Image (cartoon, rainbow, N blue to C red):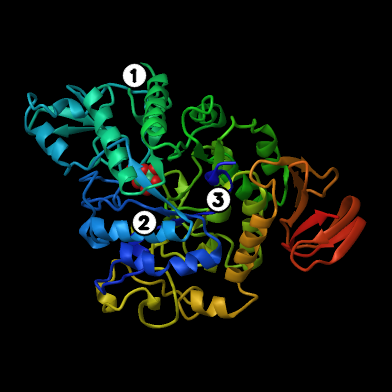
Amino acid sequence: MNWYEDSIFYELYPRAFCDSDGDGRGDLLGIRQKLDYLQWLGVDVVWLLPIGDSPLRDDGYDVRSYYQLHPDFGTIESFRMLVDEVHARGMKLLIDLVVNHTSDEHAWFKEARRSKDSPYRDYYVWSDTPDKYPEVRIIFIDTETSNWTYDEGSGQYYWHRFFSSQPDLNYDNPKVQEEMFRALAYWCELGADAFRLDACPYLFERDGTNGESLPETHDFLKKMRAFLDTNYPGTVLLGEANQMPEDLLPYFSDGDEMQMSFNFIVMPQIYLSLKRQDHTPLMRVVRDTPPLPEGCQWATFLRNHDELTLEMVTPEVRQEMWEHYSPYMNQRINLGIRRRLAPLMDGDLRRVAMLYSLLLTLPGAPVLYYGDEIGMGDDVSLPDRNGVRTPMQWDDGPNAGFSTAPASKLYAPVIASADYNPAKVNVAAQMADPNSLLHTIRKMVLARKQVSGLAHGAVEWLPNAPKPVVAFTRSDGSFMLLALHNLSGDEQMVTLPPGSWRDVFDATQTAAGSFTLGAYEWRWMVAE
Ligand code: BGC
């Protein structure tokens, strides 16, 4: 099996993790200092959100350079030092590559908008009218009213799928395609092991279509893969394609496109099942997911740096989820919910741990979001999605141990709420407490590494499990794990399959027959 198929990924917002030079902003050398922690937690792959130069109107997803680092993060030398240390520990580094768009401050766009005759004009998508491609949806519906913005200077509209400060690149221009190969090569040379291809479904536009997942886009992504296979074999592409199942699966193609794709289909169904205390939505979606081609894998996740997206559920389900998980309007953004995992669970760590157990036992390679392993809170008073990107809470000292700068200099305030401030939630305290959420998650992560078959093994649902219980076995022929999860706050009775079952964590033996799960309890058992 390839390394990425059974790895534990950790998504980290570099500005938030650790500030090594006391300027109030996290940096690459800070991350390097915290690799001991990540290794202790059992992380195999460190995923860095964008570190390139950027005016930061979309936290680095507005690219000003594909090569220079944002000075906050350090220098290319710091990147090398980080990557070397990651590799020395047997870990891998995944970085974001923003393929769809740049910032309007990128030199290409500045040059492009200078005049219609600029050699860079064709790097972007222009039109005399804002009426082209009317079938294309607006993604950032809370901020944008059109995917076209008028450029006064040159008298035409430019195309953008996200903020108007992020003009889309024109992939019909072979030079743009070459630029991306150049950027891939540059970061591969520096040691990147994998790339998250940001917003990859939207690379091409065609009349009469919604501009998503077009054949041209797949062709280009396959070219990227072929480029890597030829020049940097083993380098992995992880696609961020927030699409319906029938449109998501083609990103794996015949195993010759992306090796990995985020599982945007399973994620919302986990929350829906929990809300309804009914395993049906989750069971249905897992059952309906066809097997992947050889060498491909899902990246499964509970939360990330964006809103909990509800784009891929029906409007009725979206409303149901919004009402339950984000009762206040300021907790919502676009078609999603801008909250972290622990607050979504009303601070109930039994539920948080139970969801982690699901994440770690369902098929796929799990991606953890920084801070969720200690149950960090969020701050909806901050704009956009910034409330889930606050400084990591290392200890209960000044600035939660994140930075030695004066608090007023931090890029964002440390969470101060009564339930989630650093005195209540921090790494050091949880490391010292064997019963903490952090230890519980680590225990699961380490146990997962001992159990074969979790990455791809078959899923069999326990027949007759009560609705509030998610119960399945995972097996690869040689091994069988039984995972039980109680989605409700009431005791539930399940019937264990024939055989004798040993608890993975406390080694207790249970025979087939009735077994009682406490409120939100989860169990991992292996067949003896
Ligand atoms: C990233 C977002 C970003 C958007 C536009 C997304 O897919 O995850 O954080 O705002 O791309 O670049």
Given residues 41 and 424, the one toward you in this image is 41
Q: Earlier in the sequence, mark 1 or mark 3?
A: 3
Q: Residue at x 26, y 46 (%)?
A: 62
Q: Which amino acid does label 2 sit on?
A: Val
Q: Which residue is drawn at 54% across and 65% down?
A: 41
Q: Which mark is residue 493?
A: none
Spot occupied by residue 100 in the image (x, y as percentages of width and height): 31, 35
Mark 2 or 3: the one toward you? 2
Residue where numbered disc 2 is placed: 83
Instruction: Determine whether 203 is above or below 432 in the image.
Output: above
Whether residue 133 appears in this view of the structure is yes
Q: Earlier in the sequence, mark 2 or mark 3?
A: 3
Spot occupied by residue 288 in the image (x, y as percentages of width and height): 67, 32
Q: Give the alpha-carbon distance from disc 1 to disc 3, as whole Å.
A: 37 Å
Residue where numbered disc 1 is placed: 206
Neighbours of disc 2 within 10 Å: few (<14), some (14-19), many (20+):
many
Quarter of the image that includes the C terminus: bottom right
Side (left or right) of 237 relative to 506: left
Spot occupied by residue 465 in the image (x, y as percentages of width and height): 83, 48
Q: Which residue is drawn at 7% across and 33% down?
A: 114
Whether residue 160 appears in this view of the structure is no
Residue where numbered disc 3 is placed: 7
Instruction: Determine whether 221 is above or below 71 in the image.
Output: above
Q: In which quarter of the image is residue 439?
A: bottom right
Spot occupied by residue 89 in the image (x, y as percentages of width and height): 47, 61
Q: Which amino acid does label 3 sit on?
A: Ser
Q: Earlier in the sequence, mark 2 or mark 1?
A: 2
Q: How many marks?
A: 3
Given residues 227 and 350, the one toward you in this image is 227
Tell me the SS state at disc 3: loop
Q: Which amino acid does label 1 sit on?
A: Arg
Tell me the SS state at disc 2: helix
